[in-house]
Image (cartoon, grey):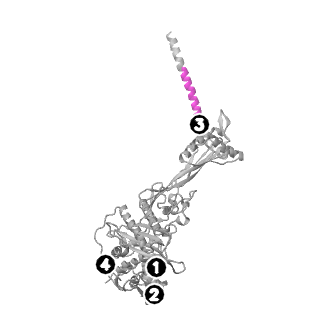
Amino acid sequence: MGATKKTAASAPRRRTVVALAVVAVIVVAFVVRLVDIQVVRANDHLADASEKGLHGSRTLFGVRGSIVDSDGDVLATSTELYDANIDPYLATNMTDRVDGEEVDVPFSEFAPDVARVLDMDTEDVEKIVEDAVAEDPDDRWARLAQDITTTQYVDLVDLGLPFLSFEAKSSRSYPNGQVAGNLIGYMSSDGEALAGYERMSDSCLAASNGEESYQQSPGGIRIPGTETSTPAVDGGTLQLTIDSDLQWYLQELIAEEAADKKANWGSITVVDAKTGAIRAAAESPSVDPNDPVATAPEDRGSRLFRTTFEPGSTFKAVTAAMLIDQGKADPLSTEWVPNREVFPNGAVVNDATDHAAANYTLAGVLDESLNVGISKFSDRLSMQTRHDYLEKFGVGTPTAIGFAGEEAGVLHPADTWDAQTRYTTAFGQAFTVTAPQVANVYQAFANGGVKMPLHIVESCTTADGEVVEPELPEPERIVKESTADTMLNLIENVALAGDNTIDVPGYRVGVKTGTAQKSDGEGGYKPGVYATSIVGVAPIDDPEYVVIATLDEPKTIRSSAATVPALTDALTQVMKNYRVEPSSGNPTIYPKTR
């Protein structure tokens, strides 16, 4: 009885052991076959696939880098969109192997999954393929969907369908609209950088696509272990020195001022006096990079860098600096200054407003902005010396910014100056500059006589984290430190004198205005038309910022007084924006006459 029970209990165990053995044999057989296919005979299979042209690949798309401001706030960014395409011929000739037999797989088996990802009706997806095949049975391309998201792209790729292909296109977005639009630039609809730093720094921002390639079976199935890939490289991050909040405020300000004064255009530029970094470069009109075609072509670039003008009286301070630096005058030096002077060489110089003839100090000449006075003082220096100083201050050479289309201005050789030019160059005529060049001159005054290279690009951070800073010229001493200090005192006197009084509560400031005639293109000047400007430095006791405001052909006020409100508001905002320490001490007041 005991033996019978033992035999009965052992039977199920024997059956289990047998079943497990059979399963093990099957598994081993599959493993052996898999090793044979993927390892032992892998090269044969790959060679066979290669001979039959059964290659598959897909592009790995890189993302264009962002442009950010000085605080890292995004000014331009990319969203990758894709166009999905389908191979109608391959889609309708898919096969699979069932029980060792190759069978056709209709496109209707795949269409629902494709439609689900694209949020389309299955019937519409099938119709795209049907229409393409009806027109050409051998057609290898049809558009399936445009502008699909990255998520949809990834989901379609995950379906593993060999008849799908994709085209990436970068959708560029500018979150702040027109803010710094003239600097940032814009892209074409097909992703080409067209203007501004989008184009100038394309080598930093541009991405490199990669590729994944593999071998596939005749039925379109990827062969495991055959994948090779070249990874995509995203673009770098371009950081500008621009403060987007300040830029926005100043763009609003100059737009209002240009409209109020009925000027053709206007600008406000803010420079960090100690570093040469441009903190704002506001212009009106401006362009919205999200929709550049909405702006007139002539307003899409930056007039700030491509427009030159005779600076006028802002460069009387430069003549004064030359004299002081060469020891030929000081603020209390005097010249007899009438309202009109005929010089020994026949040149005639007139002052803009009537005044009594008097012994004017150099300080008084700047306060009253007297053409005759600065002309008479300029005779204390040779024309070549004056030319060389103008050249050192940056006249005739583009700034270190190197903006696309930036003009250098014109400075003729001293030996070509005629009788009249000998004196007009003393008060900012007969040569041309850009607003940034003027700002750079006053930056040197504010920085102890050392001219720093102006720049807008802070750095490019590559995809792997390397920070690359721009190569800039070395700082250059233009005048002695004592000369620069004296010039600050002189332009502070100007700020406290006459109709151009600038009041920035809590701060001592220095300014100089400029009202320049505009060339008629035929060797003369347009009647009653002017380019007006005003440049300011603050705080004068410890200079941190230089601000220049310009208006082109203002019509309600034609003199430089048109720019005074813009500079006053701009300087006030800059001091607030950067929480600059209020001024201390008292100005040095010089007499105008002696």
Q: Which one is earlier in the sequence, the residue at label 1 or at label 2?
A: 2
Q: Which residue is mark 4?
A: 590
| Residue 18 forms part of the magenta stretch | yes
Q: Which one is earlier in the sequence, the residue at label 1 or at label 3?
A: 3
Q: Which one is earlier in the sequence, the residue at label 3 or at label 2?
A: 3
Tell me, yes or no, if residue 256 can be seen here: yes
Local SS, label 2: loop
Label 3 crowding class (10 Å Cα cut-off): few <14, some 14-19, many 20+?
some
The magenta region covers 14-30
From the viewer's perspective, is 86 left or right of 375? right
Q: Which one is earlier in the sequence, the residue at label 3 or at label 4?
A: 3
Rounded to the nearest whole Å, what is the CA distance between mark 1 and mark 2? 14 Å
Q: Which residue is mark 3?
A: 34
Q: List x then y, in percent, for residue 84.
A: 60, 48
From the viewer's perspective, is 377 left or right of 404? left
Q: Are marks 4 and 1 in contact (CB under 8 Å)?
A: no
- Amino acid marked by disc 1: Gln
From the viewer's perspective, is 248 left or right of 7? left
In this view, the mark in front (1 or 3): 1
Q: Quadrant of the C terminus?
A: bottom left
- Amino acid marked by disc 2: Ala
Q: Which residue is mark 2?
A: 347
Q: Which residue is mark 1?
A: 429
Of residues 3 and 86, the one nearer the viewer is: 86
Label 1 crowding class (10 Å Cα cut-off): few <14, some 14-19, many 20+?
some
Q: List x then y, in percent, for residue 515.
A: 44, 76
Local SS, label 3: helix
Is the magenta region chiefly helix, strand or loop? helix
